[in-house]
C-alpha cells in the first residue's frame, strides 16, 4: 500500500512556549531546536519574532544554525509583523513565514472589529507581502472551526491565489469533535479552488482532550501536515502531542497509512530535555513518554511481561527511547516478579522462603506505594533473622545486582516508612529495571496474581 508522507510541524517553541511556566530563553530554545532536528521533525516553528527581542533573537539563532528542517516564524496579518518575521528568518536554509488572521464572526466582531470583506482583503494582502519575501508561506485562519464554512472556503481561495503554499486549519479553542473536524477538512478539499496545489494542515488544541484524535481525523480526511508539540504543551490544555500522533501511525499502520520522518527513538530523550529545560514535569500516566507508560505493577501483567513482553506491550520502550520496561513492585505485584527482584539483588530464594518474604512484602506494600530495593533488602534481612540488622548500603550484592542496588543507602531505615514517596522526574522508580526474560520459568499458580485485568 502506498504510504503518504506527512509533514510533522513542531510548534513547541512557539505555541508550546506560550503556555504558563514554559517560557525559554534563547540558549534553551536553541538547545531544544537541535534536539528537534535530531528527532527528525520536518518543520520547527521557532517563535513569534515581533513578540519580543528575545523571541526574535531565538528565531534568528535557530535559522542560522539548524539547516535541515523548515524554520517557521509567526506573524499577524500586517506588514510590521511580516517584515520582522522575515528579518529573523532570512538566514535560514528553508525559511517559512506563517501568517495568521482570525476569521470567525465572534473574533471579527469582538477582537478585530472588522468586516468579513476587510478580513478577506487583509489576509490576501498579508500573504502577498509574505510571498514577496519568502517562497514558503503558510496561512492560518484563526478559529477556523467556528468560522462560517462558506466564508472559510472563500478566504482560503484568496490566500492560495495570493501565494500561500500551506493552509493550516486551527481548532484554536479546542472545540471540534473528530468526525466534525474530518468533515471540515473534507469540505475544504471539495470546495476550495486550487486546494490540490497546497498542503492542508491541522492545528488542534486539547481543551476537550481530543487534539490527537482530531489531528488523526484530519489526516484521514486528506490533511498532510500536523502541527503538534512535545509533551503536548501549549496554550491552556495544550496542543496535539507529537509523540502520540507519531506512535499512533507507527503502531497502527493498518489504520493510518502515513509515514513521518520522525526518529521515534528520540521521542523520550526530547521529552526529557523539554521537561529539564522548563522544569515542567510530564504527568506519570502520559501516553508514550510518561514515567508509567511502560511500568507494570499488576501481578498478572508482570507475570505475562516476564514470559513475553508482547502480552501487555503494544510497542517496546526501546522504540520510543525509554531504556527499558519498569516492573514496579507494589501491592499488586506477584510472587514471580518479587522473586526475580530478590534474585537480582543477590538473594535467590527457595519457594518456601519466598512465600514468607512475599507475605511480609504484601503487608509492606499496603503501607507504601512503591517498594524500592532498600525496603526489600531490609525485609530480606529481617526474614533471614540476622541478629544485627545490616544497613542496606553494606549488603554484599552480586556484581549483576550492583546497579540495581545503586539507590540503596538513601533514605534507608525505618523513618523512611513515614515519608511520602519521593517524586522524581526520572522514570526510574525502582533504581533499576527488571530485565525481561520471555523464557522465564513457567509458574502457573493462580495465587501469584493479586490483581487481574
Ligand atoms: Zn495554537
Image (cartoon, helix red, strand yellow):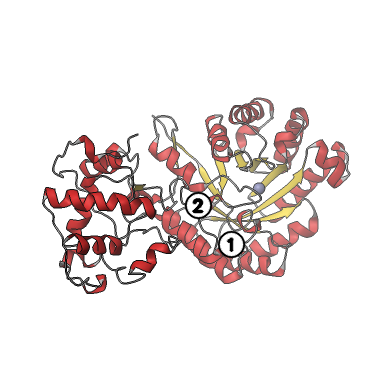
Alpha-carbon span between mark 2 and mark 1:
35 Å
Image x and y of residue 44, in percent: 56, 55
Instruction: Classify residue 1 as left or right of residue 136.
Output: left
Image x and y of residue 28, in percent: 55, 68
Q: Which comes before the other along the chain, label 2 or label 1?
A: 1
- Is residue 128 in sight in this rendering? yes
* Helix, strand or loop at mark 2: loop
Residue 25's image quarter?
bottom right
Instruction: Look at 52% across and 44% down and name the residue there.
Output: 7
Viewer-side residue, 142 vs 399 = 399
- Is residue 328 in sight in this rendering? no
Image x and y of residue 425, in percent: 45, 61
Image x and y of residue 423, in percent: 46, 61
User: Are the residues tagged 2 and 1 within 8 Å (C-beta)?
Assistant: no
Instruction: Look at 13% across and 57% down and name the residue there.
Output: 348
Instruction: Look at 62% across and 31% down and name the residue there.
Output: 177
- The residue identified by callout 1 is 92
Residue 191 to residue 335: above or below: above
Residue 18 to residue 64: above or below: above
Q: How would you rate the neighbour count of disc 2 (Cα within 10 Å): few for under 14, some for 14-19, many for 20 or more? A: few
Residue found farthest to the left: 350
Residue 287's image quarter?
top left
Instruction: Classify residue 351 as left or right of residue 141.
Output: left
Q: Is mark 1 within 8 Å of ligand 1?
A: no
Q: Nearer the viewer, mark 2 or mark 1?
A: 2
- The residue identified by callout 2 is 283
Residue 445's image quarter?
top left
Q: How would you rate the neighbour count of disc 1 (Cα within 10 Å): few for under 14, some for 14-19, many for 20 or more? A: many
Viewer-side residue, 248 vs 47 = 248
Instruction: Classify residue 59 as left or right of residue 132.
Output: left
Amino acid at each position: 500500500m502506498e504510504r503518504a508522507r506527512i509533514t510533522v510541524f513542531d510548534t513547541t517553541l512557539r505555541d508550546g512556549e506560550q503556555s504558563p511556566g514554559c517560557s525559554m530563553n534563547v540558549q534553551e530554545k536553541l538547545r531544544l531546536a537541535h534536539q528537534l532536528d535530531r528527532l527528525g521533525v520536518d518543520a520547527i516553528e521557532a517563535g513569534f519574532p515581533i513578540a519580543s527581542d528575545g523571541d526574535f533573537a531565538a528565531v534568528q539563532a535557530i535559522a542560522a544554525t539548524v539547516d535541515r528542517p523548515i524554520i517557521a516564524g509567526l506573524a499577524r496579518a500586517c506588514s510590521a509583523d511580516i517584515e520582522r518575521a522575515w528579518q529573523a528568518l532570512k538566514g535560514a536554509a528553508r525559511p517559512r513565514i506563517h501568517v495568521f488572521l482570525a476569521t470567525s464572526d465572534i473574533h471579527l466582531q469582538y477582537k478585530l472589529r472588522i468586516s468579513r470583506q476587510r478580513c478577506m482583503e487583509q489576509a490576501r494582502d498579508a500573504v502577498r507581502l509574505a510571498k514577496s519575501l519568502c517562497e514558503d508561506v503558510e496561512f492560518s485562519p484563526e478559529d477556523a472551526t467556528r468560522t462560517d464554512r462558506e466564508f472559510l472556503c472563500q478566504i482560503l481561495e484568496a490566500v492560495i491565489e495570493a501565494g500561500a503554499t500551506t493552509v493550516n486549519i486551527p481548532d484554536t479553542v479546542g472545540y471540534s469533535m473528530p468526525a466534525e473536524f474530518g468533515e471540515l477538512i473534507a469540505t475544504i478539499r471539495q470546495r476550495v479552488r486550487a486546494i490540490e496545489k497546497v498542503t492542508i494542515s491541522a492545528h488542534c488544541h486539547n481543551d476537550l482532550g481530543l487534539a490527537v484524535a482530531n489531528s488523526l481525523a484530519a489526516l484521514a480526511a486528506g490533511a498532510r501536515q500536523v502541527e503538534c508539540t512535545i509533551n503536548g504543551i501549549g496554550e491552556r490544555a495544550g496542543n496535539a502531542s507529537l509523540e502520540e500522533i507519531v506512535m499512533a501511525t507507527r503502531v497502527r499502520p493498518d489504520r493510518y497509512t502515513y509515514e513521518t520522518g520522525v526518529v521515534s527513538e528520540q521521542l523520550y530523550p526530547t521529552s526529557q530535555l523539554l521537561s529539564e529545560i522548563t522544569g515542567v514535569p510530564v504527568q506519570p500516566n502520559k501516553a508514550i513518554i510518561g514515567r508509567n507508560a511502560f511500568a507494570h505493577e499488576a501481578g498478572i501483567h508482570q507475570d505475562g511481561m516476564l514470559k513475553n513482553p508482547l502480552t501487555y506491550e503494544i510497542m517496546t520502550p526501546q522504540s520510543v527511547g525509554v531504556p527499558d520496561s519498569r516492573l514496579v513492585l507494589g501491592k499488586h505485584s506477584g510472587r514471580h516478579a518479587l522473586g526475580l527482584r530478590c534474585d537480582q539483588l543477590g538473594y535467590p530464594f527457595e519457594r518456601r522462603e519466598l512465600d514468607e518474604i512475599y507475605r511480609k512484602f504484601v503487608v509492606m506494600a499496603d503501607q507504601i506505594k512503591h517498594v524500592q530495593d532498600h525496603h526489600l533488602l531490609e525485609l530480606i534481612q529481617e526474614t533471614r533473622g540476622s541478629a544485627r540488622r545490616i544497613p542496606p548500603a553494606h549488603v554484599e550484592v552480586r556484581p549483576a545486582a550492583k546497579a540495581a542496588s545503586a539507590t540503596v543507602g538513601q533514605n534507608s531505615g525505618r523513618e523512611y516508612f513515614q515519608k511520602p514517596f519521593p517524586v522524581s522526574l526520572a522514570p526510574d522508580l525502582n533504581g533499576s529495571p527488571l530485565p525481561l526474560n520471555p523464557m522465564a520459568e513457567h509458574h502457573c499458580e493462580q495465587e501469584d496474581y493479586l490483581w487481574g485485568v
